[in-house]
Amino acid sequence: MVQTDPNQVAQTIADQLALEVGNIVPAAVRDARLAVCTQCPFFQNGTCTQCGCYVRFRASLKNKHCPLNHWFDDKEHLSD
Ligand code: SF4
């Protein structure tokens, strides 16, 4: 999926997330994940260069994690 128009990318992400019923994290979790991503050296133009995902999409899903376990909730799961 190669798109550079920010509005088109945002719409595509919204469309894809609408298909993920039951797999969406609470907004606070998504926002905390995105706060980590935007400070990460692998974050470029809304994309994670480690996994290739749009981070807004990946960070919104329950069944996704940071490939480097940088999200706070990944660390909590790893300590279980
Ligand atoms: S998912 Fe992980 S590696 Fe990728 S940009 Fe976010 S914090 Fe960085």
Image (tube, grey):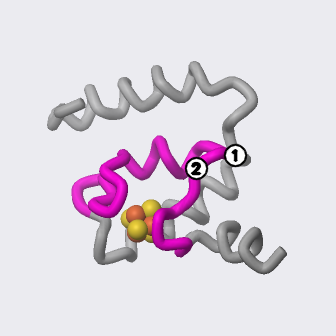
At 36% across and 55% down in the image, what residue appears? Answer: 51
Q: Residues within 10 Å of mark 2 (few under 14, many from 20)?
A: some
Side of 26 where 55 appears, left or right: left
For disc 1, the marked residue is 25
At 57% across and 21% down in the image, what residue appears? Answer: 18
Q: Quarter of the image containing the C terminus?
A: bottom right
Q: CA–CA distance between discs 2 and 1?
A: 10 Å
Examine the residues drawn in magenta and state their main secondary structure.
Answer: loop
For disc 2, the marked residue is 64
Res 40 → quadrant: bottom left
Farthest residue, direction right: 80
Q: Residues within 10 Å of mark 1 (few under 14, many from 20)?
A: some
Is residue 65 highlighted in magenta? Answer: yes
Q: Quadrant of ligand 1?
A: bottom left
The reply to whether residue 37 is visible in this rendering is no
| Residue 67 position within the rendered picture, expressed as x and y whole percent measured from the top left | 47, 64
